[in-house]
Image (cartoon, rainbow, N blue to C red):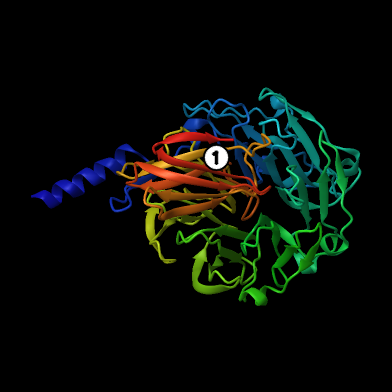
Amino acid sequence: MKIPVIIFLAAISFIINGCRSYNPAGNFIITDITEETGFGGPSHPDSLGGHGIMWSDVTKNGFPDVYITMNWKSPGIEYPELFYTNDGRYNFPELAKQFGIDDVDGGSHGAVFADLNNNGYFDLINGSTLTVDGGPASNRIYENMGGEYFTDRTPVSIRNTFENTRGVVAFDFNRNGLLDIVFITGWRGAADAHERNEIYINQGDFNFIKYDLDIFENAVAAQGVIATDFDGDGNIDILSCNMGGNMLILKNDGNNGMYIVDPAEYGIKHRAYSGITTGDLNNNGLLDLILVYNTGGGRPHEAYLYMNNGDKSFIHTHTFENVDGYMAGLADLDLDTYLDIVFDGHPYVYLNNGDGTFRKGPEIPLVNIDDPRCVAFADINDNGNLDFAFAVKRDINRLYRNDYNGPNRWLKINLYAPNGQAGAFGAKVYLYDTDGNLIGMREAKSSYGYLAQDDPVIHFGTRGHRRVNVRVEFITGEVTELSNVRTNRTITIR
């Protein structure tokens, strides 16, 4: 008699909860909350075009807000970006115009929230792609004015440069405690012509000087870009996609210079069309790689998993076939300490087995989703579970809640650099149990994959650990250590 009861209860759960999927083994349900929260964006066909997602707590109320870049049918159509504030009660009003960051143009792709003046507030870098008449556009920088609104602080050096910007990253190139900016142009890479990437060095007080570094400006790159110390040498490098050739690996030499490295030197033999993701997938303290590639000019895509050997080389261990979307997003959705994978638009989560292999997890309700581009994660209600959003080009954007209900615990770290910089991009955060065994590692970074920015608050699942030790290695060399930290809460490290 027990089996029919279980089936009946599962059926009731599905009916009551509407568009949900249930996986008892995974201990969590993914729920589409787009409609009830007011999330999603304009529904008129000429006003769609979601591309990038950027999370951060702009308003300083303890709940992450979200920015979505828009682009589709230019020329002749104005595309404002979307900005949803979050009150922590599942209300997401769209207030881009009121906050001064609607950035009306012919379309944008990349953007990043970054603390550009080290005052603890996240400013906004917007990578404009097109003017309304279809020409190349100039990018914009907006200062966060105490969480109440933004003001345009774009310096002349950026305002007077016109390119078709796609990817955007903020990172401390010269390790002086100020975030510099990289703009990647073009969408095809090797097939694009007459487009130049841009790098700007932060002088303080929103003064940026264009850095004339020919090897970077002329590098073949497109779409997704990530600033990451992927090989563990202490320098933040630039990795970017290329539709028509090898992915770009632009090594930082640690002395204000860069040089291009053939991916084959690292054992990387596959291409990256749209998204490059780094993360510690087996909790050994090393960053692994996932590359997303378009094999036939359309969908579905393939994704290539490369595990880090620890000797500045990688080995291809698995190909994810028939995945939708443009990138792999990483988050510990079931709080077991291991980063799981969400491919934007894919119908289910890939749960991490902890050894570099994955299994099918809970379903993601898609409801006829059309052309998903990006996925990014944030804990929208401050309950310790990471939720996520999809940017969708040919339909409304989607917001999903992670209803984890298992026994595992968590820790969130609101990270500031010693100079006050919110997010402390470039830092590495190591979590240990109280016996000194590594639980996991996270790298603080501005963006990754295809135009994605997770909430900069660092998130760990801790399984059953009620107390842990934390070590933070900042990009400028300082180290902070905390012992016997209680879990199931958010801490601040400055």
Residue 182 picture location, percent across and down: 77, 51
Pick out the residue farthest to the left.
1
Quarter residue 466 falls in: top left
Q: For this rendering, which residue is in front, 41 or 413?
A: 413
Residue 15 picture location, percent across and down: 30, 41
Would residue 400 appear left or right of 359 to someone viewing this image? Answer: right
Residue 441 picture location, percent across and down: 50, 53
Q: Which amino acid does label 1 sit on?
A: Val
Which residue is located at x 41 percent, y 47 percent? 461
Report helix, strand or loop for mark 1. Answer: loop
Is residue 258 visible in this depiction of the protein? yes
Q: In which quarter of the image is the C terminus?
A: top right
Would residue 453 appear left or right of 30 to someone viewing this image? Answer: right
Binning the other alpha carbons within 10 Å of mark 1 as few (below 14), some (14 to 19) or many (20 upward) gives many
Quarter residue 39 falls in: top right
Residue 354 picture location, percent across and down: 40, 61
- Residue annotated with mark 1: 457
Q: For this rendering, which residue is in front, 172 or 397?
A: 172
Q: How many labels does the image show?
A: 1
Which residue is located at x 52 percent, y 25 percent? 87
Check the image and report above or below for 304 versus 392: below
Is residue 107 visible in this depiction of the protein? no
Would residue 217 appear left or right of 302 to someone viewing this image? Answer: right
Check the image and report above or below for 57 versus 214: above
